[in-house]
Image (cartoon, rainbow, N blue to C red):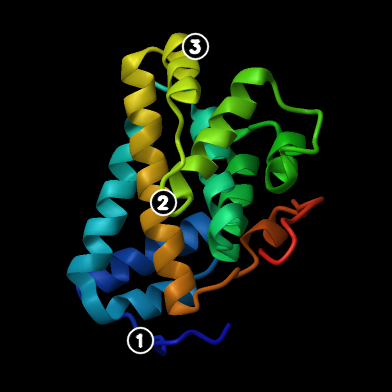
Amino acid sequence: MTTRIPAVEITGFYGALVKKFSTKLFGKVPESLGVMWHNRPVLKASMGFGQKLQRWNSCDQSLKSYAHMAVASFIGCSWCLDYNYFMAHNRGLDLEKARQVPCWRESGVFTPLERDVLEYAESMSATPVAVTDTLSARLLRQLGAPALIELTSVIGFANLTTRGNVALGIESEGFADSCELKPLATRSGHA
């Protein structure tokens, strides 16, 4: 991977914790952490918020995961798509659906609700934001207000991380390879 900001060595007590956690989760320390190590307060805040949103439970985990993958595919963040395939495998999510997220419009594996969630994720990621009242009302009816707010926040965080990774030149590090989950499709021009 050639990032726009070179990775630095991860050091100190907090660095040892980060490396231990990363090695336990991924089997290695991602190079992207060395890039973010240049500004530890930003890294800590991002990791902390990411961990907090994983504990939210008003919205189904698989819907949130597919939404994050849709954002990653739409924005073109190969790191996030790779990471989310890895996490889908580890969480026991439907791997066929995970593989098909980048081409969800052409795929027949998604339920109507999942298709609405994927459309919502892409619509929130567009510039300008393209969420319609009709789509929002459908999701509100199907999910309820707490889950829709949670989903919206997860998609917003996914946009923060995916856009940052793309801007910094952070790319896939082969997480999905380690669990032999290969994407069956990628959005043309992306991932």
Q: Earlier in the sequence, mark 2 or mark 3?
A: 2
Depicted 104 relative to depicted 43: above or below: above
Q: Which residue is mark 2?
A: 128
Could one spot residue 107 in this view of the protein?
yes
Rounded to the nearest angstrom, the CA distance separating label 2 from label 3 is 25 Å
Measured as percent of width and height from the top left, residue 10 is found at: 33, 80
Measured as percent of width and height from the top left, residue 12 is found at: 22, 78
Q: Amino acid at mark 2?
A: Pro
Measured as percent of width and height from the top left, residue 17 is found at: 30, 64
Measured as percent of width and height from the top left, residue 136 is found at: 43, 23
Q: Earlier in the sequence, mark 1 or mark 3?
A: 1
Q: Which residue is mark 1?
A: 9
Q: Nearer the viewer, mark 2 or mark 1?
A: 2
Choose top left, top right, bottom left or bottom right for residue 26. Answer: bottom right
Quadrant of the frame with the N terminus: bottom right
Q: Amino acid at mark 3?
A: Gln
Q: Amino acid at mark 1?
A: Glu
Q: Nearer the viewer, residue 94 or 108?
A: 108
Residues tagged 1 and 3 counted as in contact (Cβ below 8 A): no
Q: Secondary structure at mark 1?
A: loop
Rounded to the nearest angstrom, the CA distance separating label 1 from label 3 is 47 Å
Q: Secondary structure at mark 3?
A: helix
Depicted 159 relative to depicted 22: above or below: above
Q: Nearer the viewer, mark 2 or mark 3?
A: 2
Residue occupying image coordinates x 34% and y 32%: 55
Q: Which residue is mark 3?
A: 142
Q: Is residue 43 left or right of residue 3?
A: left
